[in-house]
Amino acid sequence: MITIRKATKNDAQACWDIRNAAINKGCAGFYDAGDLLIWTAGELTEKFSRIVDAHFYVAELVTEESQDKKVVGTAMLDAPYAQLDALFVSPDAMGLGVGKALLKFIETMAFNQGLAQLRLESTLNAVAFYRSCGFGGEGLEEESVYCSPRGIALDCMVMYKNLGRPSAC
């Protein structure tokens, strides 16, 4: 079972680890290995911890046999920019519906806040996922370049979704 809750500062390390693992696993073959090393280098920072505490939501997976909860995904809504950010799923939980559950959660939150459209910058490996969930299409996506604060430039796809009543992808 997947549950989603507001993240706390105590979740920051798990969010950092999920981010890095998802980038290294999902983006391999789509981006230069050296760029991935730069993108995921370093340790958890206080700034990242503050952002997690203020803006992130986490998905937890509950195992039936033990009823233990494990953080397996992250996402955030940057409401002033109507933008979905930091949607990452742990590689060992990919394909279990975690990304779709987080996306539906953020879409519902955005819709309830009165946003008519949601924007995201997708890595190349995730474009098909977002398209399958209603993002992009004619006039709703454009090629772009993400300029990382770490000095690397990565091709990406800016994608939009017009929000109506949120639905599962």
Image (cartoon, rainbow, N blue to C red):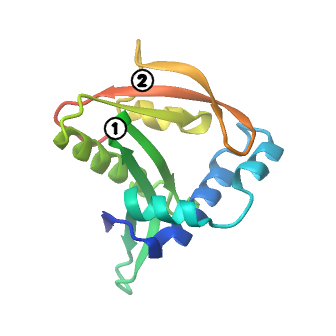
Who's the residue at 41% across and 65% down the image?
53
Q: Position of residue 90 (x, y in %)?
A: 54, 61
Q: Is residue 56 visible?
A: no
Residue tagged 2: 136
Label 1 vs label 2: CA separation?
21 Å
The crowding category of the residue bearing disc 2, from other C-alpha atoms within 10 Å (few below 14, some 14 to 19, many at least 20), is many
Who's the residue at 28% across and 42% down the image?
107
In this orientation, which residue lies closer to the viewer: 125 or 96? 125
Mark 1 vs 2, N-terminal side = 1
The crowding category of the residue bearing disc 1, from other C-alpha atoms within 10 Å (few below 14, some 14 to 19, many at least 20), is few
Who's the residue at 50% across and 26% down the image?
158
Q: Position of residue 166 (x, y in %)?
A: 21, 39
Q: Position of residue 115 (x, y in %)?
A: 24, 33
Q: Is residue 143 visible?
A: yes
Q: Quadrant of the C terminus?
A: top left
Who's the residue at 70% across and 55% down the image?
40
Q: Report the side of 111 relative to 142 (left or right).
A: left
Q: Position of residue 74 (x, y in %)?
A: 45, 58
Q: Quadrant of the N terminus?
A: bottom left
Reply above or below: 52 against 81.
below
Reply above or below: 38 against 157.
below
Q: Which mark is residue 10?
A: none
Q: Report the side of 133 relative to 51 (left or right).
A: left
Q: Report the side of 102 relative to 42 (left or right).
A: left
As shown in the figure, which amino acid type bears the numbered disc 2? Gly
As shown in the figure, which amino acid type bears the numbered disc 1? Pro
Q: Which mark is residue 80?
A: 1
Q: Is label 1 in a helix, a strand or a loop?
A: helix
Reply above or below: 69 against 112.
below
Q: Are marks 1 and 2 in contact (CB under 8 Å)?
A: no
Q: Is label 2 in a helix, a strand or a loop?
A: loop
Of labels 1 and 2, the one closer to you: 1
